[in-house]
Image: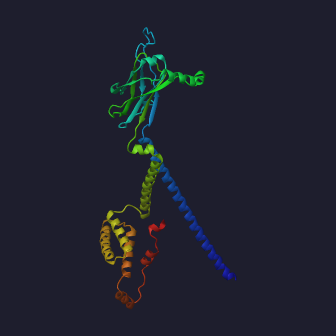
Amino acid sequence: MGGVTGPVFLWLQVVLGVTLHRARRTLLQAAILFCVLALLVWVAVFLYGSFYYSYMPTVSFSTPVHYHYSSDCDATNSVLCSFPVANISLLKNGKDQVMIYGQPYRISLELEMPESLVNKQLGMFMIKMSCYTNDDQTVAAVVRSAMLHYRSGLLQTLNTLLFSPLLLTGMTEQKQLVEVELFSDYKANSYQPTVGAVIEIQSRLVQVYSAQLRIHAFFTGIRYLLYNFPVMSAVIGVASNFAFLSVIVLFGYLQFIWGGLWPPEQVRVRFGLIFSVMMGDTTRMQWRREEARKRMSFSQKSSSDEPPVLLEALQIYETDASEEEPADLQDRGAVAGPQVPQLGDSMLRQRRGPWMSL
């Protein structure tokens, strides 16, 4: 009984060891594959994010407008000594340009004006905007008109009575927000970039609480898709980067497995041999075998270090071709006696190709 259980336990120990070795190898391969995929995904996301933030310009830009005027005259009846003027910088953080080259922008000015008697009697007034460069050269100028929205006396009385609680508590004011479009399609010049603007209200009677300059970009083409469809664009961009990186990693892995960069002629011969073996075409296989012999003889003359896979593929072809010989040739071989298999053939049959290591 002991003589029987000994080999059984030995067999179980061998089987368990082989199984654990295969499981460990499979787990290691799965872990490496997961790490590689995670790294590829992270790099793909990083590349898309870098492209997005470098390619997409500022969507909107808003800055307060602070007007100044002269006060060294004898002004009466709420008349200013000069036109209100404001100088605005169009640089973010003092160095980055707000408007990039070739991108159309809409530039507008928002005026917060009280519904005072002076503003009502003022009527229309002009607003001028001049864009300049670093050397104070004017590259664009525009003049637009503006005025308060008309309200009749009855409408203003009803509005005052209705909102009297809010007006008394200071939660609201009797004012209007007047928006003036200065540029509808402004494009910066690449040779003369816009770094600032001068805004002037050409009226000495105007009364303004505050003002805001707003710049909004109108996107077209790829920027339009990136801005209006961010999720779909992100999925497509990350997937494209992931596919491209996967192809690069796959080629690098195959290069590492196959061992070095081969000359183009040897690569063509090798894939031609493999294709003929898969197709089973005897005529094509014989022609490829002759071509392989010629190229192998030429490469052996030029270099002593040849990839062993080419020799293996050639010997496999010769083995497959011998299997497809006519029956009479096989009978002759049978009459002549059994042939002893060569050691190289058995090793070729047992050796795994590089693709089996995956």
Provide residue 6's location: percent of width, then percent of height: 66, 79
Report the residue that reaches farthest toward the bottom.
Answer: 335
Q: Nearer the viewer, residue 125 or 331?
A: 125
Residue at x 37% of width, y 76% of height: 280
Whether residue 315 can be seen here: no
Hey, which residue is sitting farthest front in the picture?
154
Relative to residue 117, is residue 74 depicted above or below?
Answer: above
Depicted 223 relative to depicted 152: above or below = below
Above or below 21: residue 142: above
Q: Can you tell which quarter of the image residue 87 is in?
A: top left
Is 273 left or right of 253, judged from the image as shown?
left
Which residue is at the front of the view, 284 or 73? 73
Q: Is residue 108 above or below residue 36?
A: above
What colour-coding does the image apply?
A: rainbow
Residue at x 58% of width, y 64% of height:
24
Q: Which residue is outermost to the right?
A: 1
Tell me the quarter of the picture where residue 258 sits: bottom left
Q: Position of residue 274 (x, y in %)?
A: 38, 71
Q: Is residue 280 visible?
A: yes
> Residue 139 placed where, x, y %?
33, 28
Q: Where's the N terminus, which quadrant?
A: bottom right
The reply, left or right, for residue 325 in relation to residue 243 is: left
Q: Nearer the viewer, residue 13 or 139?
A: 139
Q: How many marks?
A: 0
- Residue 299 in picture, x, y percent from top left: 32, 67
